[in-house]
Amino acid sequence: MSAISVSTVTKRFPNGFLALKGVDTEIAPGSFTVVLGPSGAGKSTLLRLLNGLETPTGGEVLIGGEKVDRHRLRDIRTKVAMVFQQFNLVDRLSVMTNVLTGRLAHRSWVGSVFYLFRQEDMAIAQEALARVGLTDKAWNRADKLSGGQQQRVGIARALAQRPKVILADEPVASLDPVASEEIMTLLREICDRDGITVVVNLHQVELARRFADRIIGMNAGRIVFDGSPAQMTQSVLRTIYRREGYADDNSLELALAYA
Amino acid sequence: MTTVSNWRWPTPNGLPPLPLVGTALGLCVVLWLTAPVVEVDFVRLFGSIGRMADFAGQMFAAPDWQYLPQLMTKMLETIEMTVLGTAIAILFSIPLGVLAASNATPHPLVYRATRDLLSLMRALPELVWALVFVSAVGLGPLPGVMALAFVTVGFMGKFFAESIEVVDPKAIEGVRAHGAGWLQVRLFAMLPQALPDFVGTVLYILDHNLRAAAILGLVGAGGIGYDLVMAMRLFQYDRLMLIALSIYLIVTMLDRASDQLRSRIIHGGRR
């Protein structure tokens, strides 16, 4: 059974914009998938649908065979973690508390009222921090860390959830090349060692080639390519990044020449 | 001449924006029309300068040191009323603030109802509520504390709600995406981020409440207010000065302390 199954999903936003025009795909458990595409192609919307942060207008999304449904979001989200471009940490809380919020889905509100966590949750959070190499920063405030470190806290929070799937929405878009490399290596390692299914949205074609098992190319709300990195030729890239209304797109040719 | 005609406002046609000019003109007209209604009369104002100077001069009588022990007791009572009233108000304001914040409320109707309740609570000043509570529970500091807490919830709940509404939605999404429940999102994403604003509000309100508590004695609701009014009525300027000075002193001390506390909380004092 596939980890993620998306069937004929459409998404129209309240302002009338049709972000997804019927997307079908299956993602195998334990695989590392990168979604490429120009800004506005619907990559983020697709990822957010998988976590229930958006609801599809048509079609359905299954995670491990269970439908992502507005009434069962908490249950779905215990299995699907998310890593964000802007990290989305709670700046004023300690790194440790941020990682512990990854455990909230598994616990009722009773202890949360007093900010209390169980011993086993603390252990899981410690272990997650050790995985991302931030044990010594555990009690720093989250906003005192560098961008790369904050993203590692984001990944630790995702790990603390003990998910089956990790979704990463442009996780390296606000990071320098070295930190980007670290984050991608970390995500790849999590996929290989824990068998967690990873889906990453990227703008960097080169990173996609190096880290992905499979690349999905999107353009204007549709999947226009689906294959291995080796199958992604220059002409495929031209299809993925093609822009409407540009007969002879010089910028596109120049950008792809170095991709 | 060319230099003057060179000035431009940053608008497409270089002229000042019409809504701004209209508002300014409208305000001027309103002021001009309403000034006579509240009897702003400059002739009368200048005529009474002599009397004001006389009153101010009387304030500099030799202080009545005999009064000092009673003053201290009454000031302490005023401070206790302030702190207690504010503390009780915080307890009620946090949940009410969550219900009255558009991004945290469970339902738009709850939001509307809570907002209306809060504006009802602050519709009348402390003094009026104190009168109500004095007739309900009798004279003394207790009705004063109740009146303070009541009106403070009205203000604080609204301020808290507004601090929650401007919280960064990215962190809320981050916590929500990991499956946190309704209450957990509010506790772990919204409240920590609104905390510096909360602290600012509480410190401001403490300042305000101290001054409010200082006049509640006027209606028999405890504190320094009764002595203050009596000193004025009986022309005991030797006492009046001491009272005014001690209120000023405590407000200033509170202000200093609050500056310190605020910067520690905003910049994260502990490392």
Image: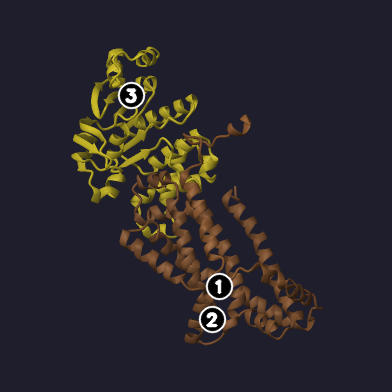
Chain colours: A yellow, B brown
Left or right: where does residue B250 sit relative to residue A104? right
Same chain? Circles 3 and 2: no
Q: Identify whether B264 is placed above or below B146.
A: above
Same chain? Circles 2 and 1: yes
Left or right: where does residue B75 sit relative to residue B112? right
Left or right: where does residue B140 sit relative to residue B45? left
Quadrant in the picture for residue B92: bottom left
The residue beneath circle 2 is B142
Same chain? Circles 1 and 3: no
Which disc is residue B129 wearing?
none
Q: Identify whether A79 is placed above or below A247.
A: below
Q: Nearer the viewer, mark 1 or mark 3?
A: 1
Chain to which the residue tagged by mark 3 belongs: A
Q: Amino acid at mark 3?
A: Ala
Chain to which the residue tagged by mark 2 belongs: B
Please, which residue is most extreme toward the front here?
A: B1
Q: Position of residue A254 (x, y in %)?
A: 39, 13
Decide: few, some or many residues near mark 3? Use Cα within 10 Å; few <14, some 14-19, many ≥20.
many
Q: Identify whether A117 is placed above or below A205.
A: below
Decide: few, some or many residues near mark 2? Use Cα within 10 Å; few <14, some 14-19, many ≥20.
some
Q: Nearer the viewer, residue A258 or A216?
A: A258
Q: Residue at x 68, y 64 (%)?
A: B252
Are circles 1 and 3 on residues that touch, CB within 8 Å?
no
Q: Amino acid at mark 1?
A: Leu
Which disc is residue B84 wearing?
1
